Image: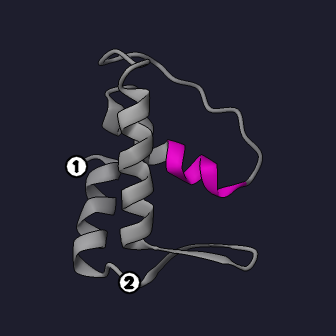
Amino acid sequence: MLVHDVLDFAASAAGTTDALIFGARRWSFRELADQVARLSTGLSDLVEPGDRVVVLSENCPQFVLALSAVPRAGGS
């Protein structure tokens, strides 16, 4: 099971429950899974299966999105 599989399961089981809170902004599991799916679709044009991807980021919500979207797009 991959990270994005866990997120997809959580989105179906507890869709409206808060998954990520950053400052005043909150994302439900369903919102987070949707944004991960959208990001991974964009990344799939750039990432070949098995490519290594590095994410250089400060502590921010986009890091959480990338953490799930990269494997979903085929990268590692």
Give whichever of discs 1 and 2 has the lower sequence position.
Answer: 1
Type of the residue with mark 2: Thr
- Asked whether residue 76 is in view, the answer is no
Question: What mark, if any, has residue 45 been given in the picture?
Answer: none
Question: What mark, if any, has residue 1 been given in the picture?
Answer: 1
Instruction: Identify the element where label 1 is drawn.
Output: loop
Instruction: Identify the element where label 2 is drawn.
Output: loop
Give how far across and how far down residue 11 sits, in percent: 30, 70
Give how far across and how far down residue 56 sits, in percent: 70, 33
**Quadrant occupied by the C terminus:** top left
Give how far across and how far down residue 37 sits, in percent: 35, 48
Give how far across and how far down residue 69 sits, in percent: 42, 42
**Closest to the observer: 37 or 7?**
37
Left or right of 35? Residue 20 is right
Labels 1 and 2 touching (C-beta < 8 A): no
Type of the residue with mark 1: Met
| Residue 64 is covered by the magenta coloring | yes
The boundaries of the magenta stretch are 60-66
**Closest to the observer: 68 or 37?**
37
Alpha-carbon distance for marks 1 and 2?
A: 22 Å
Question: What mark, if any, has residue 16 been given in the picture?
Answer: 2
Above/below status of 58 relative to 19: above
